[in-house]
Image (tube, rainbow, N blue to C red):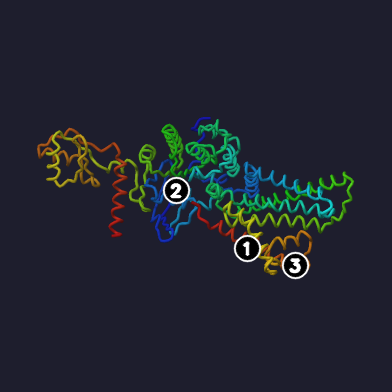
Amino acid sequence: MITSSNLTKSYGRVPVVRDVSLHCEPGTITGFLGPNGAGKSTTLRMIVGLARPDHGSSTVSGRPFVELPNPTRVVGTLLDPSAMHAGRTGRATLRIAAQVAGVPSDRVAELLELVGLADAGDKRVGGYSLGMRQRLGIAQTLVGQPQVLILDEPANGLDPEGIAWMRGLLRDFADRGGTVLLSSHLLHEVQATVDHLVVISQGSVVASGPLAELLASASLMLRSPDPEALARALASAGIDFRPGPDQTFTVDVLDGRVTPELIARVASEQHVLLTELRQSDSGGLEQLFFTLTAAKAAHSQEAAA
Amino acid sequence: MTSTTMTRPVRSADDHSPGATLAGIPFSRLFRVECGKATDTRASRWLLAAVAALTVGLMLAPLLAPSSIEQTYTSYLSFAAIALSILMPVVSILTLTSEWSQRTVLTTFTQEPRRTRVISAKVLVSLLLAGAAAVFGGMVTAAGLAVAAASGREVEANLNAGVVVGYLLFVLLNVFMGVALGALLHNTAAAIVLSFALPIAFGMLGFALKSVAEWIDTSTTFDWVLNGQWSGHTAQILVSVALWIAIPLAAGVLRTVRREIN
């Protein structure tokens, strides 16, 4: 379990993280999503005690991270796969982690096997690709058999096969009662992996909740063979819309105020034929993501003006 | 073994049983880990090999130039001391800084958030390496003296406890200057450059200002330690130790504890 409340941090006068609260339950994977520079890494570093918050606090498994007696037995952390000693082999890197955690060193070979580095274990990390370092980093997080994983951009550098592999591994970990918090700016990766989502933009949480809920609240997709008539009908009903390709329109559901039934009624009353009316699927999260972050950016520009 | 069993959390999330979760990391374990880290990379091994080669190389000087170099046990030992004082500080600098340069502090300080324990382990490792190096230097000296004796040369056996203590302290002080610089600067290149440049700079300053030479220039004050010339110089030696070791080391520990890691 990870609980953070009101984490806030500035570097000098620049606010980096503002009032970020997170709650990650056992058995779930929480995606921490935001564009680069949104404050994700700083938040994760505050959770694990590498950076001090100006305000707010966090606990992992009920304790502040820095008070965990042997943290790697409770929480596996992968913050930066490039932060490994280039001169050590993958095996030596894991052996050190196992030694600190106090677990038998035969676990090292098992973990190298698990992450697909059995053949590269005796090569120096300096010769690893980013994807291999991510795999080694994942192995390192699992050394102490923790209940919690905190991963910063774990999909970076992984090929599609690697991403699928990691998704299965994390799902399995969560299904067995583990808690996972991972950050990403890769929307599709997050969408396929997480149960919960916390979206951050410019240091503040702009949306959070179960993935299904956040997706459901995004938008509807409509199609009509007579797009001009549909546009007139929507406009007369006061419904905002965005025309898309191939006679389609996208309509925001506005927290449930716009429903498929309402659209169908409007179309029926105006005698407009609808050939499609459904929840937007492709890039649903992407749209949510851009809507949220763009709105936030526009807002702050207004505030600055 | 399947991935299923490998990734299983060892305890269920609401089982707060003591044992593995609650037991802290014993200091002896941290010390062993840091010992390994200080000696398991190619860079550190080359450096230690260079220390050995330099010590052996410098020992050739009193052997090959008997007319210009005093033929005494103490004189031979001082060549080992000087050899060790050149590169051993770099070994301890690496021990203290390489985790910052390689950014592995990110891992190390999440494995053990009590950072003073990690630094203490590293300082202790440096102490151990300094001791081992001093013993090695003693062995090289013994070998040098054996060669001198075998060649039928007369070498004055003027070794006593005071000389040995002076030798050990000299090696230790030089190593700890490296420790302190490394602990303070967190940057391998900067610490190494300064560890060579500062003694030269203060040595030159010492030519102009006698007080600098006697209170700050460690090539003067540590030489007194090596030669057992404490009388009349105790205060000066202690001031230079405070200035170059105690103060930067304390500041370095403080900086390490406070520094945010990106």
Crowding around mark 1 (Cα neighbors within 10 Å: few <14, some 14 to 19, many 20+) is few
Left or right of residue B109, residue B159 in this image: right
Task: Give amino acid for label 3.
Answer: His
Which image quadrant is residue A216 in?
A: top left
Marks 3 and 2 belong to one chain:
no
Amino acid type at mark 1: Ile
Q: Residues within 10 Å of mark 3 (few under 14, many from 20)?
A: some
Q: Contact, CB < 8 Å: mark 1 with mark 2? A: no
Label disc, if present, on residue A123 of the rendered structure: none
Q: Secondary structure at mark 3?
A: loop
Q: CA distance from mark 1 to mark 2?
A: 40 Å
Where does the image place residue B83, in percent across and percent down from the top left? Answer: 73, 51
The reply to whether label 1 and label 2 mark residues of one chain is no
Point out which mark residue B233 bears. 3
Q: Label for residue A2?
A: 2
Residue A157 drawn above or below residue A17: above
Question: In this rendering, would B55 be left or right of A287?
Answer: right
* Residue B247 badge: 1
Q: Which residue is painted at 62% across and 45% down in the image?
A: B37
Closest to the observer, A112 or B25? A112
